[in-house]
Amino acid sequence: MSKLWQDKDTGEQNEAAKKMEAFTVGNDYILDQVLVPYDIAASKVHAEALQDAGVLTADELQKLIDGLKEIESTWKKGEFEIRVEDEDMHTAIEKTLTDKLGDLGKKIHTGRSRNDQVLTALRLYEKEKLYEILKKLKQTASALLDFADENKTLPMPGFTHTRKAMLSSVALWAGGFAEMMIMQLEAASGTKVLINRSPLGSAAGFGTTFPINREMEAEKLGFGMPMACATTAQLSRGWVELQLVQFMHGISSILNRFASDVILFTGEAYPFFDLDSAVCTGSSIMPQKKNPDLAELLRGRHAEIGGHAATLQMLTANLGSGYHRDLQLTKEPVIKSFENLSEMLGAALLLIEHIRPNKTNLEQACTSELFAAEAANKLVKEEGISFREAYHRLKQNPELVSEISLDELMNEFTHLGSPGNPGIAELKAQLKNYQSFV
């Protein structure tokens, strides 16, 4: 079969044509394998719209639907092939339909372009994968809150400038990361709006003279609405994907900082937590080593998602309206980001399940210098002096700090978000409220 844009089969390619094909197709024919079921779903709905518009008979529609279902079944078995000469899944699917149904198979492309085809499949993929990511994000936040709840009375040093600063707690440490995840769940509503408009029926970006019911197509595919202007479809391609990947980069940044803390606080310098051997590796030369490779790679994967965001940012710069072949390259960063982040969230859950606080080390690490600010606060309360005066008195007489005990100080922290009242119950309630959201 000739390519969709050729008027006839040109037969054998010359060397230049083969090199041209290899460069322009790239790895699209491989990437498209994950998008096949979404393209088939859109093709089914488009076929129904064509029948509604009088292009297909009821019998032709049924034959096309049956053919598409057969292709989907083949794909589920891992047997659907997209060859480099097909360029993409659209050609491979149409070719398979044509081989089975003859000229009827070619009718599936009536009133549409590969431009709205790929964008519709990609947006359907994005909607489903975002749902999965948010579900995993919620699970990770929940695991952190459970961890915090189990250890809510354990004190822990708090750090600024990577130096001991003030008293904190294990629950406050874990709860902070969990709350960041909850905030990211809230922020997802804006991202969902961006991917919830259907581009199907926009064709090459300028519509079509066939009376396609785009509202019906959008509704059947689960979109909130169709894009009103056909030109929006190509203008949004890459622009939406950039914001989607940037949203995922926000999630990976939380995981990155969590992993950094796990690495630091399970090492010899700050042995606050014990990391199970199941999530560590050994050394080929040093038999004593217990390396936090899982946490290190979790930290490092954040850079990959940042790279995908940077790629999209540069790809979409300086493009005029309408379609450009550059936009083909926006597909891979999105797919890779989803795959990467899904694995990162799984790795974070593993870490949470296999890390345990070392109570003795934590308590011993809460040395008196952590109480300096609260010792100054005590002077303010007892003597009615200004905090600044109390601050200077403590600086000149540091021995006054030793008069405060750890247990006494933990009991004095009563306000929300403090070591003695880390707000875990409130965060659990917030997370529960988002159950329907994900």
Image (tube, grey):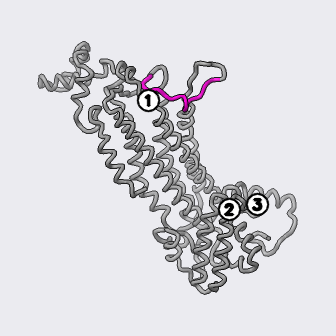
Secondary structure under the numbered disc 1 in the rendered image: strand
Mark yes or no: residue 239 visible. Answer: no
- Mark number for residue 75? 2
- Mark number for residue 356? 1
The reply to whether the C-beta atoms of the residues labelled 1 and 3 are less than 8 Å apart is no
Camera-side residue of 149 and 399: 149
Q: Which amino acid does label 3 sit on?
A: Arg
Q: What residue type is labelled 2?
A: Trp
Mark yes or no: residue 294 visible. Answer: yes
- Mark number for residue 83? 3
309 above or below 298? below
| Separation (CA) of disc 1 from disc 3 | 50 Å
The total number of labels drawn is 3
Q: Which residue is drawn at 78% across and 59% down?
A: 21
Sequence-first disc among 2 and 3: 2
Q: Which residue is drawn at 56% across and 58% down?
A: 238
The image shows residue 14 at horizontal and vertical percentages of 87, 61
Camera-side residue of 143 and 24: 143
The image shows residue 336 at horizontal and vertical percentages of 60, 50
Q: Specify the segment rendered in magenta.
A: 271-283
In the displayed structure, does residue 93 sit left or right of residue 297? right
Q: What residue type is labelled 1?
A: Arg
